[in-house]
Image: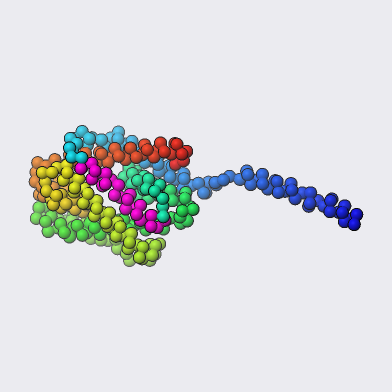
């Protein structure tokens, strides 16, 4: 009994066990909470946020605010419709990602930053920012790349298809008012728009990650968002220049959409020609468009400043 008792009390393992446990706890405390690999989405989000601020500053220092020198619309309805027009893209995206990921209201702010980055930095940089934002919230969504990719591709496809629909509706009228030198650009640009959609449709099983039913739903949300955008810009123009009927503004809004997406044409000249043919000369639409563009930039800057202040307060990007 004595030898058993002495052996138990002098067992080296029994004496070292508490020390090993304490050392393991101390080592665990020294391990970094987040490794560089896990922090890269936050780093990318920060870099893109800085690029967004730099892009806005460049536009401000350039001629971005020149449009504000034009007379501001008198109707308060213009500004209400403008606000609805501004939030329509992030609202459409929020509806989509709310269904896909159940994102909280905080995600709406990230989608506004996505829009600002796409317009102030370079195309699809905002999508990269939103992907990085989603990756920092792994508890909300485990693999966001597939969904962000599918939503971005479907946004482009729906825009191209809407352009083709608008072109088909406006082409008979356009051929009557446009000079013949624009015909080549129109008839070459239309097949190019179609060709841009074909690879994604032909290889859809390899390109897309979401199921077919969800993809169709996302497509129709984008289509409704684009239609709402055309309707809202038409009403904004109508409230700013009420001397022109809403029907003419709706036609011109559709023309604006199809001209903006058709390649191989001088967009400004075509849009000016169509504007003169639809609403006549002497209407100050060019100044109104310049004012709207400048006002959009001002709202971009206001949101960027708000998000920057919010990041400083929360000490996060």
To which quarter of the image does residue 239 belong? top left
- The majority secondary structure of the magenta stretch comes to helix
Q: Which residue corresponds to the image point at 43% horizontal and 45% vertical from the top-left?
A: 45
Q: Position of residue 256 (x, y in %)?
A: 19, 50
Compared with 218, 282 (above or below) is above
Q: What colouring method underlies this structural image?
A: rainbow
- Magenta stretch contains residue 273: no
Q: Which residue corresponds to the image point at 23% horizontal and 45% vertical from the top-left?
A: 81
In the rendered image, the quadrant that contains the N terminus is: bottom right
To which quarter of the image does residue 222 belong? bottom left
Q: Position of residue 192 (x, y in %)?
A: 25, 58
Q: Position of residue 177 (x, y in %)?
A: 9, 52
Residue at the extreme right of the image, as rendered:
2
Along the horizontal axis of the image, is 17 left or right of 244? right
Q: Which residue corresponds to the image point at 17% horizontal and 35% vertical from the top-left?
A: 71
To which quarter of the image does residue 174 belong? bottom left
- Magenta stretch contains residue 100: yes
Please name whichever residue, 128 or 216, is drawn nearer the observer in this view of the structure.
216
In the rendered image, the quadrant that contains the C terminus is: top left
Please name whichever residue, 313 or 190, is drawn nearer the observer in this view of the structure.
313
Magenta part of the chain: 77-101
Please name whichever residue, 82 or 168, is drawn nearer the observer in this view of the structure.
82
Q: Position of residue 210 (x, y in %)?
A: 39, 62
Q: Which residue corresponds to the image point at 87% horizontal and 54% vertical from the top-left?
A: 5
**Is residue 269 visible to the viewer in this orientation of the structure?**
no
Please name whichever residue, 232 or 104, is drawn nearer the observer in this view of the structure.
104
Along the horizontal axis of the image, is 307 left or right of 266? right
**Is residue 42 visible to the viewer in this orientation of the structure?**
yes
């Amino acid at each position: 009994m004595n030898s058993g008792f002495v052996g138990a009390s002098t067992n080296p393992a029994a004496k070292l066990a508490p020390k090993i446990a304490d050392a393991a706890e101390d080592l665990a405390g020294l391990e970094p909470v987040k490794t560089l690999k896990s922090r890269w989405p936050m780093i990318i989000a920060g870099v893109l946020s800085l690029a967004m601020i730099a892009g806005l500053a460049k536009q401000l220092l350039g001629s971005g605010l020149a449009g504000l020198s034009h007379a501001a619309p008198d109707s308060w309805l213009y500004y209400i419709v403008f606000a609805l027009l501004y939030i329509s893209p992030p609202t459409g995206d929020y509806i989509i990602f709310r269904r896909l990921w159940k994102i909280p209201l905080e995600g709406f702010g990230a989608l506004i930053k996505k829009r600002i980055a796409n317009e102030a930095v370079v195309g699809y940089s905002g999508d990269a920012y939103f992907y990085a934002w989603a990756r920092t919230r792994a508890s909300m969504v485990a693999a966001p790349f597939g969904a962000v990719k599918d939503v971005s591709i479907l946004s482009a496809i729906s825009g191209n298809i809407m352009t083709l629909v608008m072109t088909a509706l406006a082409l008979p009228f356009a051929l009557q008012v446009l000079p013949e030198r624009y015909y080549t650009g129109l008839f070459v640009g239309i097949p190019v728009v179609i060709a841009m959609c074909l690879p994604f449709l032909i290889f859809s099983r390899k390109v897309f990650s979401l199921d077919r039913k969800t993809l169709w739903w996302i497509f129709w949300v984008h289509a409704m968002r684009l239609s709402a955008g055309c309707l809202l810009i038409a009403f904004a123009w109508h409230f700013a220049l009420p001397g022109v009927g809403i029907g003419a503004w709706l036609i011109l809004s559709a023309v604006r959409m199809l001209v903006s997406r058709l390649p191989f044409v001088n967009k400004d000249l075509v849009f000016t020609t169509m504007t003169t043919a639809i609403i006549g000369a002497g209407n100050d639409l060019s100044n109104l468009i310049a004012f709207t563009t400048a006002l959009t930039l001002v709202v971009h800057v206001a949101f960027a400043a708000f998000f920057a202040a919010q990041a400083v307060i929360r000490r996060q990007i």
